[in-house]
Amino acid sequence: MHAPLPLTLHEEPRADYLQKVTGTAVYASDVEVPGMLHGKILRSTVPHARIRRIDVSAALAMPGVVAVLTGDDLKDLPGTEIRWGLSLRDRPVIALDKVRYVGDPVAAVAAVDEGTAEEALDAITVDYDTLPYATTAQEAMAEGAALVHDDMDRLKDYYFRGEAAPVEGTNIFQQWQYACGDVDQAFSSAARVFEDTFTFPMVFHYAMEPHVCVAHWKPGSLEIWSGGQTPTAIQRVCSEILGVPLACVRVHSPYVGGGFGGKASVKIDPLVAALSWKARAPVRVCLTIAESMLTCRRLDAEISLKTAVDGTGRIVAKSIRAVLNGGAYADTGPAIAIKAAIRAIGPYHIPNLRLEAVGVYTNTVPGAAFRSIGGPQAVWATESQMDIMASALGRDPVEFRLANMADKGQTIKPDLRPLDVDMHNSLRKAVAALESLPEPTDARRRGRGVAVGVSDPGIVPVGGAIVRLRADGSINVSANTVEIGQGSRGVLRTIAHKALGQPLRRIAVAEPDTLQAPYDWGTGASRSTVIIGLAVQMACEDIVRQVQETAAQVLGGSPQAYQLGEGCVEGPGGPLSILDLLRRFNGMAAGEFLGVGRVNSNTHNGDFKLAPLFWETGAGACEIEVDEGTGAIRVMRVGGAADLGHVINRKAAEGQDEGAMVMGLGHTLSEEYVYEDGQVVNGTLFDYKVPTMEDAPRHVATTLIESGDGPGPFGARGGGEGAILPVAPAVANALFQGWGVRIKELPLTPERVWRALQAAKAETNNQ
């Protein structure tokens, strides 16, 4: 087994930089355990079918094959559950009785090496009785559509905020409605009413490291090395399935090569743990990228908007219907559907609102959380319509937005926390950032577009951290926030540095480990800096208090007369090293100061009970060129702005926002799952088009606003998701501004843009 990397101490805020560029960083996919077997998964080749028979005898007879897991084994699992979920317990450990999409795990093989396991898959035969299937939400909601799930087991103790409200006897797993004001009266008396429908595609997370898990089951214990983002969720689900107490389920979280929500909650870990139980040996399963594409993806959506304005151009009413395709299993879909409807409001104060969210099962890859859940789908729709309305009313798009924006402290949705960001300032800063970039020197035709977005992060305010001040003055930070590339370990290290006043070179952050670190709900929803960062700050304050009280007992005087210096306590009588302080207090050179920080809904005098803890926002402006002969869009310049409250690591924060922007170009210009006959036909590295360096904008300017009033440490609020929100509508709005064509379906592929340009030319010629 790989030994944990030594905790290298130096002045760079992110210790992982050096480890990653030198190749010494250990990822979950690098972990090796003595006696480890290798697992492979046989997946369904049909979108919907009853499993008539599985014959694994030939596979088991192959030399080197140790075990094969199928649905028949689930009845023998020692736990209390064989299915799991977040708000609906709808996903079996492995296919039981039927398969629900192409890619559904049907059997899993554990063998002495990957090659043998792969050959064993070919030896397994499966007989199916095929069933009717649905690929789109509309097909699944049609009268007489075959049910993806015959029953829906709602969890009372759901793990993700946003309880499911399924409609029995249908494929709808979420039906949610909300209204305030008198929407119908507002529509009837409005000066203008606009109605538009926008569609958003299925999109793959495309993390560099695919899903991976190493599980080692032994009677009475389970140890897991996971590439997941939420170790405590993995711990809980595997505890239920294998009947191992939580205290005996240990989940390690090495470096993870990207997550973006695709490794949030629980994905392959229960299956790998069950395969280890069946094989009675540690088992490693590392998916290929193609297999990860069959594991989860962003929910596709159809967003319908009806918006009314008065004679002055103020928005007086809005009706939103968000229909999201959740795929074969609900996962976070019930929450995502609600978030999409809320985030389609935008940063606008609208007195009359009607929201509807519908989440639908289909026979496609399961939907999952993905960078600002429901946000890109929603903002794509509402910010495209904002430009449609501005054009029809003869208003400048920026001015029209500013006139309708909620002020800081004003409500967007009455039952949520008032807007805590000045979005007027953010939009102006984004436009200014674009204008600060080098102007093009040629005379090519260009278009400009703007967009803004706000999201209410689904943060669960539950998490903790431990900080140790050692006798030599060095510091350890322990928390279960997972380092998925966003720089969380560096942020926690910096917070401890600021809170304790100790040099960075003396501070180390440990690898997340559920046996060692306090409980944390999970890594996602821009919560790590706010929740766990705040827990670290609280733990450091606990240490300062302990040091002060100890110094007062040893040296006399008031605790407030003492303060931490570098490796010492300072106060009356001159500095005293931490080692000497402990020696004099304990009578020997022994001991440490241990601080614990816990965040819950009572934090900040109960303020954390009100959702959201903060609004995450993004404002963007872009300039594009279009090759009119091919329809290819090239984004030339981008300006962005976001209020992070307090920036802890500027380089990392800018990288997060600029990375989110480029990721947003994916679903804007090229990315989408293509389904034919129930199969993904572009599910490989070669066929699925993500942005490359050639697609990145030529010039980018990012403005990070520090208002200092966030709920996190030193006034910080979360970041890294807001910048993805404005991308698609800003590009589409630039296309309309420069070429007069409005497209309401993503992605804006060259063919789609070319056809729109040709249609516009034909219409002009016919006039």
Image: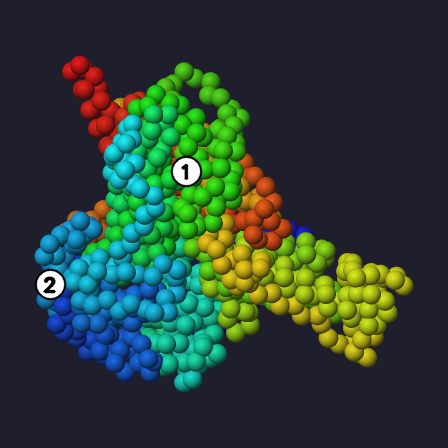
Residue 270 appears in the figure: yes
**Which one is nearer the viewer's eye here, 63 or 16?**
16
Q: In the rendered view, tell whether residue 261 sits above or below residue 762.
A: below
Q: Which mark is residue 130?
A: 2
- Residue topped by disc 1: 348
Q: In the rendered view, tell whether residue 457 sits above or below residue 395.
A: below
Residue 229 placement (x, y as % from top left): 44, 61
Q: Quadrant of residue 465?
A: bottom right
**Which one is nearer the viewer's eye here, 16 or 533?**
533
Circles 2 and 1: CB atoms closer than 8 Å:
no
Residue 168 placement (x, y as % from top left): 19, 63
Amino acid type shown at disc 2: Thr
At a point 34% along the width and 69% down the height, the residue shown is: 156
Q: Nearer the viewer, mark 2 or mark 1?
A: 1
Q: CA distance from mark 2 to mark 1?
A: 48 Å
At a point 67% along the width and 70% down the height, the residue shown is: 594
State which quarter of the image contains the C terminus.
top left
At a point 45% along the width and 77% down the height, the residue shown is: 246
Report helix, strand or loop for mark 1.
Answer: loop
Q: Quadrant of residue 733?
A: top left
Residue 560 placement (x, y as % from top left): 79, 62
Report helix, strand or loop for mark 2.
Answer: strand
Q: Is residue 713 left or right of residue 249?
A: right
